[in-house]
Amino acid sequence: MDDEPLTASDFFHRGVDLLRIGEFEAALENINSAISRNYYGAEIALVKGEILFELMRLDEALEWFNRASDLDPNLQAEALLWKGRIFFERKHFGRALSALNRVIELMPMPGEAYLNKGMVLCERGDHLKALESLEEARALIGDDDDKLADIHYWQGRAYNGLGRRDEAISALHRAIHLAPEFLDAYADLGEMYRIAGRLDQAREIYVQAIDEFGEDASLRNDYGNVLRDLGHLSESLEQLNQAISLDGEQSVAIFNRALTHERMNSWEAALLDYEAVLEHNPIDHEARLRRLDIFSRRDRFVEAQREYDALNEDLRERKDVQDTYARFLNRYARALESEGKIVKALAVYRRLLDIHPDLLDLDNPSKHFSSPEERQQNIEALLDHVPADDPNANLLPLLRMLLQARLERRDDFEDFMNAAWEGPFKELAYVCGGEMLYNGGGSIESALELCDKALEVRPDLIKALWLKVNILEEGLHRYHDAIEVYQAILKITPGNPAVLDEIGQLWLEIGEPYRALRAYREMQALMPVEPRIQSEIAQCYLQMGRTAEAIDELRRLLNAGDGGLRIGVDLVDAYLRSGNLTDAAELLADIEAENAGLNPSIEDACLELRASLLNAQRRHEQAEAAIRRVPREEWSPLGRYEMGLALARLGKLDEAQEILEPLAESDTPREEFANKALVELAKVRREQGKGEEAITLIKAALEANPYNTRNRTLLAWIVRLEGDAEAAEDCDIDVRFFKELALGRRLLLHEEFEDAADALRLLCQDWSERADAFFHYAAAQCCARQYKAS
């Protein structure tokens, strides 16, 4: 490369050499010189596209890759591979997948295409499919350490997206072993350890990475954050100082250094750092909010207000800004109350209510009072001294009503109720009235009406929404309506883990596991290392019939030591559902021996599972005996069902009926054991010679779960025994349809959406008069992102 290039070919080959060593600008200059000397063709178009891609000039790169495939169709696959990478960088994941799938069709050994497809799927959030694609890549790549390191890296990210952190960590360790210079793998691994709370291991990774990449500012910044989490504040400060010296005066490490200063109670140093951040970026509202919060915590209320005044009107509408400002105002109000300055405190209450009625806090005693009651009694006494002509005096009925409710003075509460309902911020008064009715044993419907009145005034009043959801779910058992309210809360507080958890649990309870799975996956993205979320995902898989995946999830948790014996109990349940009685019996015996009666709830759960195992083995007398060892009031739905089943199989029909009827009449008829109880009760009725009642019960079960073909077959059999041949024939037709529908539904539930759409398209051809076939076909197309077709 020392000789000066003379010909177009010389410039081309020098450009290629420069590309290989990462000298992209010089490479482009040489390639352009070759082109200006009439060296042109598909090969140079591909090279120029690659150089432009490395320079992130993506529009130009795309143009040259298109030229390459036009000039030589044999280079189409390679050009498409690069186009897929461009679409990936632009986050056009659908177009990226289309290009890469075409590469896989064109190439005989498309390992790199599978790798890139796995990257796209991972970034799009399709982590299971990403892992499948990366496994294909691994089988085709061979012994190329750099490519294998890339595969392990993306496997780590996919496993992490699924919450399988141990596998994610192992994959990233493999990537680093194969490519010790893999900076992103170190960074991601350190972050995974940090999020998992394994801070000492995170520290080891950052030390190792800094030995390799000592001049990387981002690594020192991340290491400084870990040291702060560990409580090593002086060391954290040292690393963050080094990051700033490497990165300059606009480094993100300045903000993080301010956080460390806060932990050290070095308030002035923290304020100076946040001020430095604002000097370079005056609209960085997070730095301004940190200053506001420090000032308010230090009782420097004038300066705190000044920080808020510096925010523009758009920023003041942000929830994080409103929450921080509300914390300041509530602190200020408490200080004013403690000094007896009720008129000023009343003005602060008004400001809080004007921002949002949810933000007024009359409960937190903070450092000024010994308890919430002392603070509330102090406010109550001070309100007597508010002049009648004070501009905020019209708040008094509302405040007195709220205080009487908190002090549980029902009679006094009612004295102020009507006036509060007529005054300002009546929505808070309506909610307060609803709470008193609901919690005090009053009319549930009237409490709900008051919630709705509050929400008519203020649709985003969180207090009203939470009360309404409690009334609907716990008081009225209107579960779908409750989920709608949870969704409304989620719109106001996006990504709220507590709300997602409630939604997931409720969907599971009413037999909608796929909807529950979506909620838990969203929750998992927010809290990737929370074992309970993985346990709930396993429960979703169980209800969806994906027992193998449920067992894998639960085994991982059990092997990691997360969840203790309760995870073992869930795994026994999964084994039983899958028909694996041997593993179920072995694990159940291990749990019983380890628990040895120490935890009564585990002991009861084991006895119920023991009964389930014995019923599956047709040892019904022993199953009955196992359940009877559990106090009747402690029977879970599983225990009640297994007892009813054992009694029915032993011919004790009246006793079985007594057990099964209350379970079958559950408020959540789609709940698994309520539905199974309906079917078992139908068999009891049939044995008692009450065929019509049996038919009614099975129809009720099918109304809740229309896709159970075994129950449909049972219905057809009983209808035929009752002598209604025509109705039995209709039932037989239903059985055939739902059996054929089962394949498409199974593929849907396993998230094989494109295959499901293919299967359901054929079903629609054979059953063109069945709306259910077209509904599922459209659903599969939507899930497969075939929106126009759906």
Image (cartoon, helix red, strand yellow):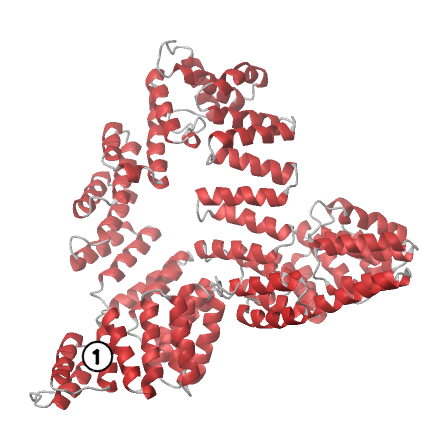
Element at badge 1? Answer: helix
> In terms of depth relative to the viewer, which is nearer, 250 or 708?
708
Query: Residue 124 appears in which quarter of the rendering?
Result: bottom left
Decide if residue 236 is on the left or right side of residue 387: left
User: Which sits in the foreground, 411 or 64?
Assistant: 64
Residue 223 screen position, x and y as percent: 29, 58
Categorize mark 1 by other alpha carbons within 10 Å: few (<14), some (14-19), many (20+).
many
Q: Residue at x 57, y 39 (%)?
A: 469
Q: Position of residue 425 (x, y in %)?
A: 44, 24
- Residue at 86% over, 60% down: 719
The one nearer the camera, 534 or 488, is: 488
Q: How many marks on residues?
A: 1
Q: Is residue 644 above or below residue 484?
A: below
Q: Is residue 440 visible?
A: yes
**Residue that protrudes farthest toward the front in the picture:** 769
Residue 336 lies, with reference to residue 581, above or below; the image says above
Residue 74, above or below 264: below
Residue at 59% of width from left, 31% of height from top?
448
Asked if residue 534 lies left or right of residue 57, the reply is right
Can residue 340 be spotted in the picture?
A: no
**Residue sitting at x 52%, y 53%:** 519
The quarter of the rendered structure image containing the N terminus is bottom left
**Type of residue at label 1?**
Lys
Q: Quadrant of residue 266?
A: top left
Image position, residue 398 (x, y; %): 47, 20
* Residue corresponding to mark 1: 48
* 651 relative to 58 in the view: left or right: right
Task: From the top left corner, tell me how far across and down residue 474 is, in percent.
Answer: 63, 39
